[in-house]
Image: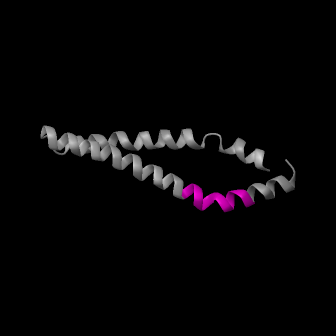
Amino acid sequence: MDKKNEEMKEVLIGRNHLQITLRVLFITVLIVALFAGLGYLVDVNFGTKPLGMIAGLLIGFPTTQFVIYKKFRNFPENLNKKS
């Protein structure tokens, strides 16, 4: 790759860094809150405090990582297409 393409990648990554960070944060908060909320509902309805919420959190974090991976796995190819 030539120097111009490398410079273009640096510009694109710099501009999109905040946008990507906010998107990952939003996905993380949304999914973890969803699973923790479902766990809380299980706790309330079945009297299993705090097992449901703990299970929800333990399921929520790997699910978040999987969703983020699926969302951004083609990022390097898309970056090459833009430059």
Q: Front-most of 8 and 26?
A: 26
Whether residue 76 appears in magenta in the rendering, the answer is no
Q: Residue at x 55, y 38 (%)?
A: 70
Q: Position of residue 82 (x, y in %)?
A: 77, 49
Left or right? Give the position of 48 relative to 5.
left
Residue 39, percent from left and from top: 25, 42
Residue 15 falls within the magenta-colored stretch? yes
Residue interval drawn in magenta? 11-21
In this rendering, is residue 12 above or below 65? below
- Residue at 23% across / 45% down in the picture? 40
Q: Is residue 76 above or below residue 8?
A: above
**Marker count (numbered):** 0
User: Is 15 on the left-hand or right-hand side of 81?
Assistant: left
Q: Extreme left residue here?
A: 47
Q: Note whether residue 57 is visible.
A: no
Q: Looking at the image, which residue is at 86% across and 55% down? A: 3
Residue 9 drawn above or below residue 78: below
Q: Quadrant of residue 75?
A: top right
